[in-house]
């Protein structure tokens, strides 16, 4: 009798392992599908950029605007950043908003330094989305359309 039970249990072990592997593969594929759907930014390369690493560049008629963050953006931490603008360009205002979830408008206080540099900081709030997409909207003086910087945070 005990031998029968032992044989029955040992026969079920491979089935449990196979089922666990199938479930793991399904979870991984589902997460990859969600991440690719969440990272479909609709941006044009003329007046926007996708932050890769901690910086990105936008080609303007007057030259290149560069955005550099001191570190990768994380939620609920103060993130310093620097803007380098072409000669003669001035920032009017900047704010950050959620792309895949409404988070209001998060102001980016800025200070103008020498050599066309602007420094500032921001702090992102937490939300229920594990992968949050953000858009920084930078309004330049004497320019009708804003410059957009897209980036993502992970929980």
Image (cartoon, grey):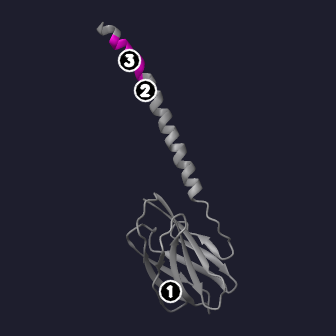
Nearer to us of marks 3 and 1 is 3
Mark with earlier residue (3, 1): 3
| Residue at left offset 57%, top offset 49% | 33
Pointers 3 and 1 in contact (C-beta within 8 Å): no
Label 1's element?
strand
Q: Is residue 131 above or below residue 78?
A: above
Label 1: which residue?
118
Magenta span main SS: helix
| Residue at left offset 48%, top offset 36% | 23
Disc number placed over residue 102 in the picture, else none: none
Please name whichever residue, 149 or 105, is drawn nearer the observer in this view of the structure.
105
Label 2: which residue?
16
Label 3's element?
helix
CA–CA distance in space, label 3 to label 1? 67 Å
Label 2's element?
helix
Mark with earlier residue (3, 2): 3
Please name whichever residue, 49 or 116, is drawn nearer the observer in this view of the structure.
49
Left or right of 128 in this view: 41: right
Nearer to us of marks 2 and 1 is 2
| Residue at left offset 70%, top offset 84% | 61
Judge the density around disc 1: few (<14), some (14-19), many (≥20) Cα neighbours within 10 Å. Answer: some
Report the number of discs: 3
Q: Position of residue 155 (x, y in %)?
A: 42, 59
CA–CA distance in space, label 3 to label 2? 10 Å
Q: Which residues are magenta?
A: 5-13
The answer to if 41 sits in the magenta stretch is: no
Judge the density around disc 3: few (<14), some (14-19), many (≥20) Cα neighbours within 10 Å. Answer: few
The answer to if 11 sits in the magenta stretch is: yes
Label 3: which residue?
10
Q: Position of residue 100 (x, y in %)?
A: 54, 63
CA–CA distance in space, label 2 to label 1? 59 Å
């Amino acid at each position: 009798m005990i031998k029968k039970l032992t044989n029955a249990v040992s026969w079920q072990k491979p089935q449990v392992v196979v089922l666990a592997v199938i479930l793991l593969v399904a979870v991984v594929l589902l997460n990859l599908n969600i991440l690719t759907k969440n990272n479909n930014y609709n941006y044009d390369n003329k007046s926007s950029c996708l932050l890769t690493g901690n910086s990105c560049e936008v080609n303007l008629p007057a030259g290149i605007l560069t955005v550099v963050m001191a570190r990768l953006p994380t939620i609920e931490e103060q993130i310093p950043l620097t803007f380098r603008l072409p000669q003669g360009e001035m920032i009017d205002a900047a704010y950050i908003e959620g792309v895949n979830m409404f988070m209001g408008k998060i102001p980016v206080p800025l200070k103008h330094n020498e050599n066309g540099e602007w420094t500032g900081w921001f702090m992102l709030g937490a939300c229920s989305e594990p992968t949050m997409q953000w858009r920084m909207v930078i309004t330049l003086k004497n320019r009708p359309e804003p410059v957009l910087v897209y980036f993502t945070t992970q929980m």
